[in-house]
Amino acid sequence: MRPIQMVDTKSQYLKIKTEVDAAIQDVLESAIYIGGRPVQDFATNLSSYLGVKHVIPCANGTDALQIAMMALDLQPGDEVITPSFTYIATTEVVALLKLKPVFVEVDPRTFCMDPESVRKAITPKTKAIVPVHLYGQAAPMEKIMQIANEFNLYVIEDNAQAIGADYIFSDGTKKKTGTMGTIGATSFYPSKNLGAFGDGGALFTNDDALAQKLKMTANHGQQKRYLHDLVGCNSRLDSLQAAILNIKLQHLDSYNMARQKVAEYYNNAFADNVKIVTPYVASYSSHVYHQYTLVLNGVDRDGLNSYLSDHKVPSMIYYPVPGHRQKMFASLGLPQQDLSITDWLTERVISLPVHTEMEEDQLAFITNHVLNYINQ
Ligand SMILES: *Cc1c(COP(=O)(O)O)cnc(C)c1O
C-alpha cells in the first residue's frame, strides 16, 4: 500500500505531467510571467465552466474576499455576517478592513450558515452576508438570497472549498456555487479542489460595473495605466499558475467525482455506526468533498486522532478554534455570543484523507483503523 496522505498533489500531477510541463514550458518561452494569454484564457474558460459572466483572477482566496469587500465600498463599522465555523481567512479580512464581523451559527448537519441565525443577526448596520460553502457543500443560498433581498444586503460567497459544486433551486434549476451572490470568491491553493502549483484566487460576478471595479481594485485602482482612480491593491494570478489551472480545469469534474467516490466508500464503511455521523448532503446541493468530515458521538477524538497517527493514517481537525474564540478578534470588543452549535461541532469534528488519487487498499486501511478504535 502506498503511504496515505491528507492530499496527494504529486500523484495527481504525474498523471497530467505531459500537458502541464508543456504548458509551463510555453510560459517560460513566452517570457510573459504576469498577465498574457494564459490568464485571459483561464478567466474565459472558468467563466464558461461556471456559467458566470465575469471571472477576475487574483493572487489568492484571502485577497479575493478582501477585494470583494473593498469593491462594494463597505465602510469601517459596517457589519458583515459570517459563520464562526470556517477558515480564518473569511473573517480575518472583515476585521482587516475595519468592518465588524458578526458571527452566526451553522446547521450542525451541513456545517454551513444557518439562515435563521442570519436573520436574527441583522441590524441597521448590516451590509453584507458571507456564506461559506464549507467542506465542498453549498450553503442554503436560496434562503440566504431571500434574506439578502429583503434587507438589501450584499452576498459574498466564499467558494474556496466548493468549486464545481451545484446548488439546486426548489424549481429544479441548478447554478454553480459562487455564482449566485453579488460576488463569489475562490482560492486555487494547491490542496483546493482546483489547485494551482502555488497561490491563486479569483472573483466571480454577473454585474458588469462591479466586475470593472473588482478588476481595478485588484490592480492598484487603475483602468488606464498610471491613472489610479481608487485605492486598490496588487493582487495577480501569475501566468504559470494560470497555464496550469487551465489544464486542471478540464479535469475538475473528474477530480470532484473521484472525491465523491472516496466519500461513498467511507459512507458505506461507517453506515449504521451510532458513534459516527457521516456527512449529510442537503437536497439543495451536490457535494464535492473538499473535506470528508465526520462528527463523532461519544468518541475520544484526540484518542482517535493519535491512534490513527500511530498507524500512519493522517487526520485533521478543521477547525479546532472557531472564529469567535480567536484572539485576533479580542481587541474588537465584540459582544459575547452564544454559538453553542459551533462550539459543539468544534469539539467533535474530524476530517479523514480525501483526494483524487486515493486507492481502495488505502481506504480499507483507514476505515478499518477508525472502526478498530471506535469499536474497541
Ligand atoms: C482556503 C480558504 C480561503 C483562503 O484561500 P487562500 O488562497 O489560502 O488565501 C478562504 N476561505 C476558505 C473557506 C478557505 O478554505
Image (cartoon, rainbow, N blue to C red):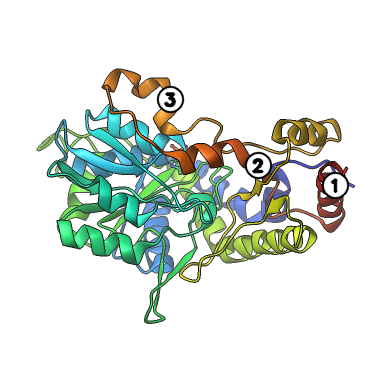
**Quarter location, residue 373:** top right
* Residue 287 visible in the current orientation: yes
Q: In the rendering, which numbered label is found on residue 350?
A: 2
Relative to residue 300, is residue 346 drawn left or right?
A: left
Specify the quadrant that holds the C terminus. top right
Asked which secondary structure carries label 1, the reply is loop
Query: Mark 1: which amino acid?
Result: Asn
**Residue 199 seen anywhere in this rendered image of the structure:** no
**Marked residue nearer the N-terminal end (1 or 2):** 2
* Percent coordinates x, y for residue 213 in the rendering: 18, 48
Instruction: From the top left corner, tell me how far across and down residue 207 is, in percent.
Output: 20, 61
| Residue pointed to by mark 3 | 326
Query: Can you identify the residue that label 1 sits on?
Result: 375
- Identified at 14% across, 41% down, the residue is 125
Image coordinates of residue 84 in percent, x first then y, are 41, 38
CB atoms at circles 3 and 2 under 8 Å apart? no
| Label 1, label 3: how far apart the Cα atoms are | 34 Å
Among the two numbered marks 1 and 3 on one chain, the one whose residue lies closer to the N terminus: 3
Task: Inspect the image, locate mark 3, and give the three-letter code of the amino acid beneath it.
Answer: Gln
Residue 344 is left or right of residue 90, and the answer is right
Residue type at mark 2 is: Ile
